Image (spheres, rainbow, N blue to C red):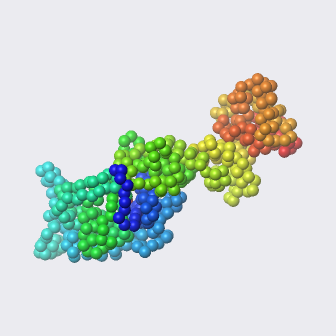
Amino acid sequence: MTDAHVPTRPVVTRFCPSPTGNPHVGMARTALFSWAFARHHGGKFVFRIEDTDASRDTEESYGLLLDVMRWLGIDWDEGPEVGGSHGPYRQSERMDIYADVAQRLLDAGFAYRAYDSAEELETRRNAARAAGKSSGYDGLHRDLTPEQVTAYEAEGRKPVIRFKMPDKDYTFNDLVRGEITFGSDNVQDYVLVRANGQPLYTLTNPTDDAMMGITHVLRGEDLLSSTPRQIALYEAFAEMGIGGGFTPEFGHLPFVLGQGNAKLSKRDPESNLLDYRPKGFLPEGLLNYMALLGWSIADDRDVFTIPEMIEAFEITRVNPNPARFDIKKCEAINGSHIRLLGERELCERLVPYFQTAGLVADPPTVKQTGTLAAATPLVQERMTLLTEAVDMLRFLFVTDEDFVIDEADRAKNLNPAGVDVARAARDALVGIRDWNTASIEGGLRAALIDGLGLKPRLAFGPVRVAVTGSRISPPLFESLELLGHRKTIARLDAVVGDPGLGESGSVG
Ligand code: GLU
């Protein structure tokens, strides 16, 4: 679809996950699109928790959902912690509302009690299948006589409550997919309330959407088949005076594919949202990438800020085709956002990662803050994940005792010839009085390139590995300046194996 969507009433969208397990990427993509749509239209965004399944929902998962939404910066106008005029926002606290709505649907004749046993349903389903007919509920208990009801009750049967689907086609204009029609044969009477009294998603979700004034439902494609049922229920609600008397508009977002051609599932490691923060993703990087799972700001542009997304977000431009999750691209986009940050901002975002690694105190000391601030610009261009800064800058924060050299890099760079280079470097650097990038570079070039006639890689590789512990590190001369004269010499001494000047305290 290409024409812009023009809402006919003030926009209210919602995100209504069930708190089971860890929050996942598909969920957050739905939240992002619903939120961006509301913000784009100057509307409201409601956060509701669909926790009616006590056997699967957990408080832990509920807490994680809130944390991850806050980390991502997807804020809500109504919902947990912020409140609102349509609360409570946890379905587990709204059970009396669902019981009341179910009773009203029964009283008004939109729903009925069905007493079929599981075996009876099964037998009839199999027969229908064998006859090539639809295997959905056949409506047998739609019009039971009072005597039949009494007889079933006397048997001790507990009824479910089913919605009576009107015998008509349902056509709606999906905001992503265009016009969709469900024929009347395809949608049977469905269960609203279980025999044990537990209300199902089929009842609780549209009840809340109606009562909370939701105007636009954006959700995953897997829920498309429930839409005609929900539209029928909305029409009943409108007649009964429940909610605002209108049916929301629907937009079904494309599947997100993981490994192979399968839907991204909990088995795909990249689907777990909780991993992104510790791995060093910025929320704005992850949000940007998730926006690309079905939407794009322009054909030739992948990197944008969230305010830019909100400004440009047009729901009819969402691509209905499945979107493939590509972790490499997600990382690359994150890297772009790292480079978009100001140095000071980036430095602040790095602090918790250095604290987690035990390299910086909480709060950081003045010296640590100064070192990290000076080192940040050295790594800003070189990373896609914040954690890479920890690896690259560890050498600046560890004590001499804790300093270790990567064994593979040592084998490659600090063979006997490399150790000779390190010795020459030590000799060139030890006497430098004014310790700065220029003097360090001048000293090393004179000794190693001009003096020993080495190519830069062979000259500086051993020094880099000896002093930073790794071949992957920030620019060498700046790194040595930041590390300081004494520590640089000490580390070269340790590699060279001679008792060094670095330990003597004669250089500072
Ligand atoms: N609780 C439902 C889910 O997590 C919400 C579906 C919907 O958006 O209607 O799948």
Where residue 366 sits, quadrant-wise, is bottom right
Is residue 246 placed above or below 269 in the rendered structure?
A: below
Residue 475 falls left or right of residue 340? right
Name the residue at 20% across, 64% down.
Answer: 165
Q: Name the one closer to the observer, 284 or 146.
A: 284
Q: Name the one closer to the observer, 384 or 461.
A: 384
Residue 412 falls left or right of residue 36? right
Where residue 480 sits, quadrant-wise, is top right
Q: Name the one closer to the observer, 425 or 84.
A: 84
Quarter for ligand 1? bottom left
Q: Position of residue 482 (x, y in %)?
A: 75, 45
Name the residue at 33% across, 61% down.
Answer: 249
Name the residue at 69% across, 39% down.
Answer: 475
Q: Residue furthest top?
A: 453
Which quadrant holds the C terminus? top right
Q: Position of residue 122 (x, y in %)?
A: 19, 57
Asked whether residue 232 is in view, the answer is yes
Task: Count numbered badges in the picture.
Answer: 0
Is residue 328 placed above or below 136 in the rendered structure?
A: above
Asked whether residue 276 is in view, the answer is no
Is residue 451 placed above or below 245 in the rendered structure?
A: above
Residue 100 falls left or right of residue 359? left
Where residue 435 sits, quadrant-wise, is top right
Name the residue at 45% across, 46% down.
Answer: 298
Q: Position of residue 225 (x, y in %)?
A: 28, 56
Q: Position of residue 166 (x, y in %)?
A: 19, 64
